[in-house]
Image (spheres, coloured by chain):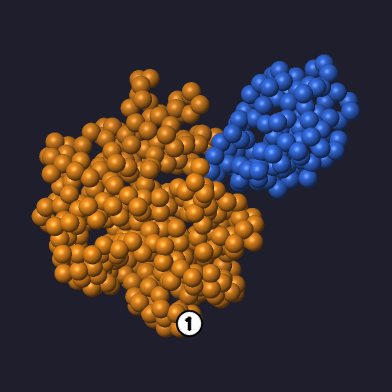
Amino acid sequence: MAELRKTPLNAIHRSLGAKMVDFGGWDMPVQYPTGIINEHQAVRQKVGLFDVSHMGEIRVTGKQSMPFLDWLTPNSVIKLNTGQIHYTGLLNESGAFVDDLLLHKISDENFLLVVNASNTEKDFDWIVNHARKWDVQVTNESDATGQVALQGSRSLNVLQPLVDIDLSQIKYYWFASGCFKGLPVLIARTGYTGEDGFEVYCAIDKTEWVWNQIMENGRSHELIPTGLGCRNTLRLEAKMALYGHEINDEITALEADLNWMVKLQKGDFIGREALQKQKNQGIKRVLAGFKMLEKRDIARDHMSVVEDGRRVGFVTSGAPSVTLGFNLGLAMVPVHMKEIGTQILIEIRNKACPAEIIPTPFYKRGY
Amino acid sequence: MYPADFKYTRNHEYLKPLGDGTAFMGITSYAQEALGDVVFVELPEIGNSFNAGDEVGTVESVKTVSEYYMPTAGEIIETNAEIEAHPEYVNEDPYEKGWFVKIKINGDINSDLLDAAAYEAHIAVESH
């Protein structure tokens, strides 16, 4: 097996006593000694700092960047403002996902795409291969870019004293470029937790310094380092998709309940024909959120949704909800099961366990 | 971290013999750490008997689930109701507050069980 890749914060994680795991080929902290539950609650109630330097950064520049990206991705790049970010994806011809990503518009001729770590090379090749007829340059900046995510209601107070940008002026899903104690950074008001927060992009060799500065300044705000374990439970409560779970190269954007980011009217884009056809014919399966009705039942990824003893769907992500006090999950179910209040059965260790479809996101922040 | 008067399985259960033909069982410190925050332990019915190696129930943590097995043949005479309300005891104090069941040992204690030194050697290999 190839050696695991390391972020510039690897030594810090180890010195903090983190439990390290292989996450898509990266040696990443799943949790610190604090534990997933405490880390989850710290982000929900106060603030946590994540190392997300493994994420991929792909830059698209050049005269035709805007029309190219508008054709490459399903969301409307034409309508995106400079300084704004939107959630979108790379779709294949079937309308399913090569990857999902955050697209940042730096100017009409400069866009930053932030993609999943384990998909970076695949995405880069996909973009390059589709860019041949366009006047654009595609650069993989992942190895040169570090990223940390400060998440939780106290994020602004922790970060503000360190930067020369008025963070209160950055709206959700917007970003600004500025200086972090003199260091050029990009600060985006985004995250993968359902909380307010900021993602800070910097030169890779400065990541450790940035991390330490934020941790030090966060001490009085009870900031703690938080790992990928709670990142997963947090994003699940907020119903944010995880590649390989809610979305993959067989699940279409409509099936993943991501209609809002598919702009069928905007003109041609890769996957549009298939999605238009699917929309006209009606989808057969869709992602829905469920709650287990018995406290002891916890659905896990890949478990079957059963009907009349047959597998008719599957759990894409399932876990105990730390914030809500019941066990929840997302499942790909036949459309007749999607309505709120529908009782479904999930097979857990050969036993059909009752669950109910409930509204999503399971958690929505109240500020 | 691995008391000398306990016996251990390779699957990370411990048996704490009380000297009167009964014993507590639970999962080891290594096991609770590997699982992460425990949120639920499925406990058996009192009065049920199991052979050594039989699956007794499951331990659910935030990120995963694992079965646990009977270290030695016996009958369940008590279950730890405390861990239903406080599953975190399994992480915080696996050998005192975080035990799973009390058993009445049938026959001799399973001779395949490891002593503390052998168990520590076992996990040193496994965690490498």
Instruction: Name the residue located 71 percent from the left edge and 18 percent from the top edge.
Output: B51
Residue position for label 1: A181
Q: Which chain is blue?
A: B
Instruction: Name the residue located 59 percent from the left edge and 62 percent from the top edge.
Output: A11
Residue A6 visible in image: yes
Give residue B21's quadrant in the image.
top right
Give residue B9's quadrant in the image.
top right
Instruction: Name the residue located 64 percent from the left edge and 57 percent from the top edge.
Output: A17
- Give the quarter of the figure containing the C terminus of chain A: bottom left
Task: Tell me if A103 is positioned left or right of A69 in this view.
Answer: right
- Is residue B14 or residue A357 the one in the foreground? B14
Percent x, y for residue A101?
32, 56
- Is residue A250 or residue A123 the one in the foreground? A123
Percent x, y for residue A148?
46, 65
Check disc 1 and give the amino acid type.
Lys
Q: Say above or below: A140 vs B123.
A: below
